[in-house]
Amino acid sequence: MTFSTMLDKRYSCRAFLDKPVDSAVLQRVFEKAQRSPSNCNVQPWQVIVVSGEKKTQLAQQLVEEVIKVQKPYPDFNWLPAYEGVHRERQFGSANALYSAMGIERQDKVKRQQAMLRNWQFFDAPHVAFFTMDKYLDIMGAVDIGIYAQTLSMLMYEEGISSCMQGALGQFPNPIKSLCELPEERGILFGMSFGYADSKADANQARTVREPVSNSVLFID
């Protein structure tokens, strides 16, 4: 499968089979991801992968934290209030997901339940947290974004589906406690991954992309 084909087929997976990825496969994928480019080759990513009983325990703690605290307290400043076309795209993405799941706009309870599944990792067998030293700020965030995209495509090449989740950086305390992160490290975002449940309603959702003419300016 070519890289272009993988880009066309890949989607954000929000329902997974109860089937862990073999540890040898994970080792191979993460070793390859180390080849990801970064500014001055600083390689700022420090990735934590949680699986098994610890993952189940963490999911419970995160849901309790979200319900109790409600207001996010991320380690990094990335909670923009989207405006204009960005807000329209955000609504379009949510509409695609909730429509695929058969959840009406006015059904606040079901929408809240669907939102909470972010912190249950959509029942994926594994979750990765992308962390870095806080002082790196936006430059480190750029590098981690490149790394995470590289990792997700390497996983897809192995038949492993994933979902990038900004939500997993919004309530970091339970994660930092479990993983014993030092104070100077922060959690940028996370990614649930495993083998997709292709029959799940949530996995029928697809989002659209803007035409190149709206995104790229060619100057000769």
Image (tube, grey):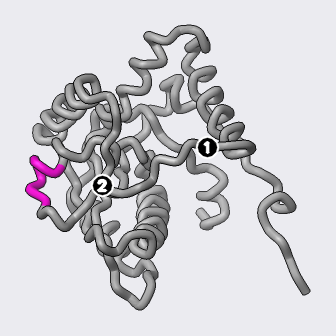
Query: Could you tell me residue 19's position as x and y percent?
Result: 28, 39
Position of residue 75 measured from the top left corner of the image (x, y, whole percent): 30, 55
Residue for badge 2 = 75
Q: Which residue is mark 1?
A: 82
Q: Amino acid at mark 1?
A: Tyr
Asked whether, in this view, residue 20 is left or right of residue 113, the answer is left
Residue 193 appears anywhere in the view: no
Q: Secondary structure at mark 1?
A: loop
Q: Which mark is residue 127?
A: none
Whether residue 188 can be seen here: yes
Front residue (pair 22, 214): 214
N-term-proximal mark, 1 vs 2:
2
User: Vertically, is 23 above or below 66?
Assistant: below
Viewer-proximal residue, 70 or 188?
70
Q: Quadrant of the N terminus?
A: bottom right
Q: Residue at x 39, y 81 (%)?
A: 35
The residue sitting at 31% across, 71% down in the picture is 45
Q: Residue at x 62, y 58 (%)?
A: 7
Question: Where is residue 175 drawn, in percent x and y?
Answer: 18, 47
Secondary element at image label 2: loop
Give the main secondary structure, helix, strand or loop, of the magenta stretch: helix
Image quadrant in which the C terminus is located? bottom right
User: Residue 206 appears in which quarter of the rendering?
Assistant: top right
Q: Position of residue 33 (x, y in %)?
A: 38, 72
**Picture layout, residue 160 above or below residue 18:** below
User: Gap in Å between the C-alphas at discs 1 and 2?
Assistant: 20 Å
Q: Amino acid at mark 2?
A: Asp
Q: Is residue 167 left or right of residue 187?
A: right
Q: Is 48 situated left or right of 208 in this image?
A: left
Task: Tell me the residue at 41%/59% (across/down).
Answer: 155
Q: Residues within 10 Å of mark 2 (few under 14, many from 20)?
A: some
Please provide the residue range marked out in magenta: 176-181
